Amino acid sequence: MTTLSKPLNEFNALDKYLSAHGTRFVCNEGEPIAAEGDQTQNYTIVIQQGIISLSRKYNDVLLGFADAPFIAGLSAGAIKNTSDYILMAEGECNGYYLPADATLALLEQGGLWREAFYWMTWQHRLLEKRDIHLVGTSNYNQIRSTLLTMAQWDDALRSRIGVINYIQRRTRVSRSVIAEVLSALRRGSYIEMHKGKLVNINRLPYDY
């Protein structure tokens, strides 16, 4: 697999085997996707429909959005994860969850290690791509890369998410700096915004 295309065949194989053992959930927009006891780090959570946001619980850093199909915590039973995360529905969302140690047993039982490996490698590559744009780069480059990410969303999602708030939660760049950069980009007709939401990107300069 040479691209960042979501490994759907592998997801389907995992979902088919795991779904019979999961606890189902349905969430509306703005509701957290909570496993038993709200300890999501001890569970595998499978999103079958909808879009979620994923953020660190202890500092509220927004890692990003994920659209279905998606699996979080597939390897959580292998090594104890001391960090907990908040998964929030960004629209109507459904799926199921199961204990992480049960997931490992099912992967062994079903001979699904190859599928799990492909899925986790895809997630790892996404995190690598994110770090390239956000770690050790300037404030402007972090803002620029986040705007480009937002431009890939569908119109319905972009129309609901405030640009400044999203960039600030994702990068921790100060709101005043973000507002200054966005104002300059709008004056230069590089981006179009309406009521704080991103409408369109014409092009973004590499330097600010």
Image (cartoon, rainbow, N blue to C red):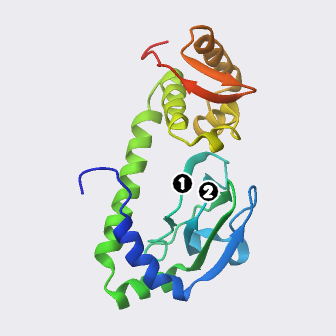
Q: Residue under label 1, please give it.
A: 66
For label 1, the crowd category at 10 Å Cα-Cα, with few meaning under 14, some 14 to 19 and many 20 or more, is some
SS for tag 1?
Answer: strand
| In the rendered image, the vertical position of residue 203 relative to residue 142, given as above or below | above
CB atoms at circles 1 and 2 under 8 Å apart? yes
Q: Which residue type carries mark 1?
A: Ala
State the quadrant of the N terminus: bottom left
Q: Which residue type carries mark 2?
A: Ile
| In the rendered image, the vertical position of residue 170 relative to residue 36, given as above or below | above
Give the residue at the far bottom of this rendering.
109
Image location of residue 144, percent across then percent down: 50, 26
Q: Nearer the viewer, residue 188 or 77?
A: 188
> Residue at image x 35%, y 88%?
110
Of labels 1 and 2, earlier in sequence is 2
> Residue at image x 68%, y 75%?
25
Q: Nearer the viewer, residue 208 or 66?
A: 66
Q: Which quadrant would residue 13 be assigned to in this image?
A: bottom left
SS for tag 2?
Answer: strand
Image location of residue 207, percent across then percent down: 44, 14
Which label number is shown at residue 52? 2
For label 2, the crowd category at 10 Å Cα-Cα, with few meaning under 14, some 14 to 19 and many 20 or more, is many
